[in-house]
Amino acid sequence: MTDTVVLKLGGSVVTDKSGDCAIDHARITAIASEIAARRADGIVLIHGAGSCGHPEARRYRLGEGLTLGNTPGIYHTHAAVCRLNTAIVETLRTAGLEALGLHPLDMGLAENGRLVAFETGHIEEMINHGIVPVLHGDVVMDRNRGACIVSGDQLVLYLARRLKNSRVGLATDVPGVLKEGAVIPAIDRAGIGAIAIGGSGNTDVTGGMQGKIAELLTLADDGIESNIFHVSKVGAFLDGVDHGGTIVGRSR
């Protein structure tokens, strides 16, 4: 059986995060070509929202939950991320991949900002039939807050646990986790205290690199290793060769 790979594309990779839903079609086309040249099955693709969703979520203060008057933010935020998802799915299909977009708002339920329910059975069936599910960071309903933002990184954690994936990769706009300009080759929970990790400089309601590492360390506690690398190394990651990035794993 082909191993399943969860590949997450950062929002800053697929959009210009300083713009207003400025989709980077050239970058997405290059990524689709890299994936299609290597494998047509066994991949679950997740992408961040970037400038298609974060500005709307901030404008409507969805990070604070549903308060009087901000429920329209659910529609506007979801509509923005769906525009990006459609662009990515169409590009993947043009490259020859049987891709289908899936929306967390339709599939998940959260409690205090964390997913507590998310249907994965049909994702497994898609994988078994050579379909590439394409999910994204999204607004979802929340039992306590009314609504919340679920990041692509939280989806990585949730799906990697339930789909029993052997490989997890996160393609970013930097070559890995950096310290004084140099890539940190490996991170575990025991050594994280010595590393200062900042958030995103652009609009980001999900925590930037700091939130990413927090999710991946939780995944590492379950024995699942993650790889963070520059988007230009997607092919290297899929080939299983050195990507020059950071590996997040369990403490030894």
Image: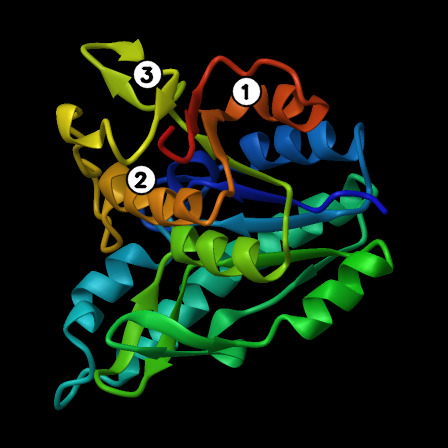
Please tell me whether mark 1 or mark 3 is closer to you in this view.
3
Residue at 22%, 31% in the rendered image? 192
What type is the residue that disc 3 sits on? Ile
At x 78% / y 63%, what residue is drawn? 126
- Mark earlier in primary sequence (1, 2): 2
Please give left or right for residue 3 compared with residue 28 in the image: right
Residue at (72, 30) in percent of width and height: 33
Residue at 39% in and 57% down? 154
Tag of residue 184: 3
Can you identify the residue that label 1 sits on? 232
How far apart marks 2 and 3 lie (CA) works out to 12 Å
Q: Are marks 1 and 3 in contact (CB under 8 Å)?
A: no
- Does residue 40 lie above or below 103 as drawn? above
According to the picture, the residue beneath numbered tag 2 turns out to be: 213
For residue 176, side relative to residue 158 (left or right): left
Examine the rendering and report whether any part of residue 18 can be seen: no
Return the residue nearer the eye: 124 or 151: 124
